Image (tube, helix red, strand yellow):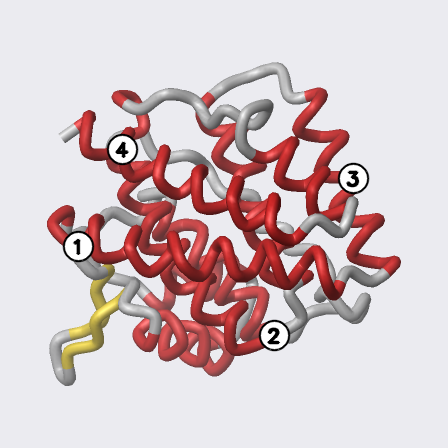
Amino acid sequence: MAADVNLSVPGSKSGRAPLLSERAYIALRDMIVTLRLPPSSPLNEERLSAELRVGRTPLRDAIKRLEAESLVLIYPRQGTFVSDVNITDHGLIADVRRQLEGHAAHRAAERLTDTDRQALSELLDQARGLSGGREAGMRLDADIHRAVYHCARNRYLESTLDHYYNLSLRIWYLFLDRLPQVDHATHHLPMIEAILAGDGARARELAEHHVEAFERSVRDAL
């Protein structure tokens, strides 16, 4: 059920090549949230270092960051393990996301730069041309959410939303076969269009509706 992860990591948002620790973090994060590294599984640093083509130091930096985001657990003298997925936390996570996703979409509409506008326009074209498939839909969902967070131009908000989105994404992949495909036409297309139009109130409303629909889909699948 878990999707393969593309370990070729693009450059950072500044246009520079990402640090090795950032590349390792993104790759490990995606392996965890898509369940390629299942809950409770141990992290073999030697194997991961070779697979990701990074040294032990950037890999450990990435692992410490993932620990802070509740995606891995480090036990002294025992090892590092992927954290369990606590389904009962889903409603609590959604409660936070409902507020912050809407706020980020509103701020994005207010603070959009020319570079942001180009990035969102490209994602809009991708969403319009997506032919279907749960995994492809989820990858695009992740790209859109993270782009909107960045467009809000608040690194604290972006970091917080990334954290909660990653936790939600693991739950989605856990029930991937039982959940509907992401409805980009209903949720993402109008939200991106509202952001590009500078309509923060409409963008907020659509972002909140998307989170509510996600929460309802997971509840129905339980």
Secondary structure of the residue carrying tag 4 is helix
Badge 3 local density, few (<14 within 10 Å), some, or many (20+)?
A: few
Tell me how many marks there are: 4
Verify CB contact (< 8 Å) between mark 3 and mark 1.
no
Who is closer to the viewer here, 93 or 139? 93
Q: Earlier in the sequence, mark 2 or mark 3?
A: 3
Amino acid beneath label 4: Arg
Alpha carbon separation for disc pair 2 and 1: 26 Å
Residue visible at 21% across and 49% down in the picture: 90
Residue visible at 27% across and 43% down in the picture: 171
Badge 1 local density, few (<14 within 10 Å), some, or many (20+)?
A: few
Percent x, y of residue 192: 68, 41
Secondary structure of the residue carrying tag 2 is loop
Percent x, y of residue 115: 84, 58
Q: Which mark is residue 216?
A: 4
Q: Mark 2, mark 3: which one is toward the viewer?
A: 2
Q: Earlier in the sequence, mark 2 or mark 4?
A: 2
Q: Quadrant of residue 74?
A: bottom left
Verify CB contact (< 8 Å) between mark 2 and mark 3.
no
Verify CB contact (< 8 Å) between mark 4 and mark 3.
no
Image quarter hosting the C terminus: top left
Alpha carbon separation for disc pair 4 and 1: 14 Å
Who is closer to the viewer here, 204 or 122? 204
- Where is mark 3, residue-wise? 122
Q: Which mark is residue 154?
A: 2
Percent x, y of residue 112: 77, 60
- Where is mark 1, residue-wise? 89
Badge 4 local density, few (<14 within 10 Å), some, or many (20+)?
A: few
* In the displayed structure image, the side of residue 216 where residue 50 appears, left or right: right
Alpha carbon separation for disc pair 3 and 1: 34 Å
